[in-house]
Image: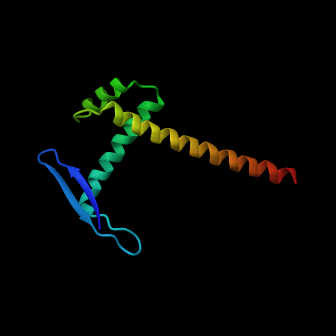
Amino acid sequence: MATATGRGRRGPALELRIPKLRKGSYFPGFLEPRRLAEKALAAVVQEAYVHGVSTRSVDDLIKAMGMTGISKSQVSRLCEETDEKVKAGALLLEQMTNGLFSAADT
């Protein structure tokens, strides 16, 4: 069993035990809206990072969205994830481009 810990706005932390299946995965449907909200928050932070918005301004943006704010370390972690994705995409593009030019040379 895997565990997931979530903190509600109106209550203490809640630990859920999520069963592991032999094939595929099990993710309870009632947790999906939370997952979507977290993805949306990450997308906003990453978009701000790409456009050069400061950490402090990102915190203000998150507060304007009705949330309690975001720490500098959380912003940094999300931005590092963005950098990793960009580097992986650039590497893949370079590999594809090299493969195309190599095939064209033969």
User: Horizontal placement of 35 versus 84: left or right?
Assistant: left
Q: Say how many tags the image has.
A: 0
Q: Position of residue 56 (x, y in %)?
A: 33, 24
User: Horizontal placement of 71 versus 24: left or right?
Assistant: left
Q: Which residue ends up furthest to the bottom in the rendered image? A: 22
Q: Which residue ends up furthest to the right in the rendered image? A: 106
Image quarter for residue 63?
top left
Please determine whether, in this image, residue 36 is positioned above or below residue 58. Answer: below
- Residue under the image location 40 percent in, 39 percent down: 78
Q: What color scheme is it?
A: rainbow
User: Horizontal placement of 6 versus 72: left or right?
Assistant: left
- Residue under the image location 20 percent in, 57 percent down: 15
Quadrant occupied by the N terminus: bottom left
Q: Position of residue 45 (x, y in %)?
A: 38, 35
> Who is closer to the viewer here, 26 or 20?
20
Q: Position of residue 5 (x, y in %)?
A: 24, 54
Quadrant occupied by the C terminus: bottom right
- Residue under the image location 11 percent in, 45 percent down: 10
Q: Position of residue 27 (x, y in %)?
A: 31, 64
- Residue under the image location 31 percent in, 52 percent down: 35
Please determine whether, in this image, residue 100 is positioned above or below residue 24. Answer: above
